């Protein structure tokens, strides 16, 4: 067993690094920068049953700690992903991916998940009930426990692969939500999706984003995400994948200490396309420096000190 090896629901990963959905396309877009087979896995762009154009421009705004996005789940639809994108990806990538699934009704979630679950390339279904940038779907399911459980049950009914639920920080009681999802069959959790925020043009006073609000991500949310992970880890017994503000190897070690089994890298990929490669390279050296033989041994260690 290598020192960077981790495991998620019997899916063995060579390291805990997973580019987050929406920041890595469908994988082949980043293959020109480095061999993406060095990754533990990656989460494909949020995919819906039917194609979506997404929100109108402008839909990106920066802030000192990262960025806001209101892309709105732009994607080509699951049929094109399965029939055109996956064959292209298989030519260059030999691992398993997280298939990020979203929708606007229980039926849409179920059918999209069913199609992706059949694909050999998919290792884990990442159920996105937390996108803050669409109306009538995404986060509207993730803020209410009963609605979230309904989506989960619908998706689990057609999936043979593990289902990890990506939760929203807009949920009033994230611990209660996490426990309910675990009790109703979630195989794992992804904590967290983006926070909700705004930016304004100081010349006009108008919101910068056409959608008015957007998802806040980047280094600025990192300590908040850590606190959420820490308190959820104490209450559940399923794996957690951490997501939010990670930008370096030290962040990975810290977040795993709080309780995650793997880490998704988001905004940093958009700032530096080599981010994941650099973090993987640095992570092995950091473990040597800290005299850690295997990174899996530090999962949740902050709860034992």
Image: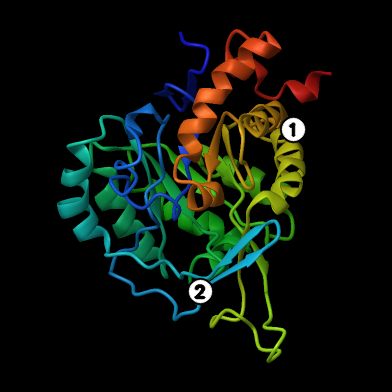
Q: Where on the picture, by quarter, is residue 149?
A: bottom right
SS at circle 2: loop
Colour logic: rainbow
Up-down relation of residue 200 to residue 204 (above or below)? above
Q: Position of residue 35 (x, y in %)?
A: 32, 32
Query: Viewer-proximal residue, 47 or 107?
Result: 47
| Residue 71 - label | none
Mark 2 lies on residue: 59
Q: Position of residue 254 (x, y in %)?
A: 70, 30
Q: Position of residue 104 (x, y in %)?
A: 42, 70
Up-down relation of residue 213 to residue 43 (above or below)? below
Up-down relation of residue 193 to residue 54 (above or below)? above
SS at circle 1: loop
Q: Where on the picture, by quarter, is residue 51?
A: bottom left
Badge 1: few (under 14), some or many (20 or more) residues near its Cα, within 10 Å? Answer: few
The residue at 31%/57% (across/down) is 112
Mark 1 lies on residue: 234
């Amino acid at each position: 067993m290598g020192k960077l090896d981790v495991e998620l629901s019997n899916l063995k990963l060579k390291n805990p690094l997973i580019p987050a959905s929406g920041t890595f396309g469908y994988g082949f877009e980043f293959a020109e920068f480095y061999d993406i087979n060095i990754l533990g896995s990656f989460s494909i762009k949020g995919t819906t049953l039917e194609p979506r154009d997404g929100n109108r421009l402008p839909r990106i705004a920066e802030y000192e700690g990262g960025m806001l996005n209101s892309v709105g789940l732009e994607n080509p639809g699951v049929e094109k992903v399965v029939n055109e994108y996956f064959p292209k990806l298989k030519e260059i990538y030999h691992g398993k991916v997280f298939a990020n699934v979203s929708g606007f009704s229980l039926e849409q979630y179920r059918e999209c998940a069913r199609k992706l679950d059949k694909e050999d390339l998919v290792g884990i279904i990442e159920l996105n009930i937390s996108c803050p940038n669409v109306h009538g779907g995404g986060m509207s399911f993730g803020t209410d426990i009963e609605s979230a459980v309904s989506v989960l049950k619908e998706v689990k009914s057609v999936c043979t692969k593990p289902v990890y639920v990506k939760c929203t920080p807009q949920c009033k009681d994230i611990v209660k939500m996490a426990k309910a999802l675990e009790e109703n069959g979630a195989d794992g959790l992804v904590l967290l999706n983006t926070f909700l925020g705004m930016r304004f043009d100081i010349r006009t006073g108008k919101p910068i984003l056409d959608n008015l609000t957007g998802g806040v991500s980047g280094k600025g949310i990192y300590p908040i995400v850590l606190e959420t992970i820490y308190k959820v880890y104490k209450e559940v017994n399923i794996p957690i994948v951490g997501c939010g503000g990670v930008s370096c190897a030290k962040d990975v070690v810290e977040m795993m200490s709080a309780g995650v089994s793997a880490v998704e890298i988001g905004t940093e990929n958009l700032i530096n396309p080599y981010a994941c490669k650099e973090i993987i390279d640095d992570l092995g050296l950091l473990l040597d420096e800290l005299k850690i033989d295997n990174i899996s041994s530090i999962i949740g260690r902050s709860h034992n000190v």
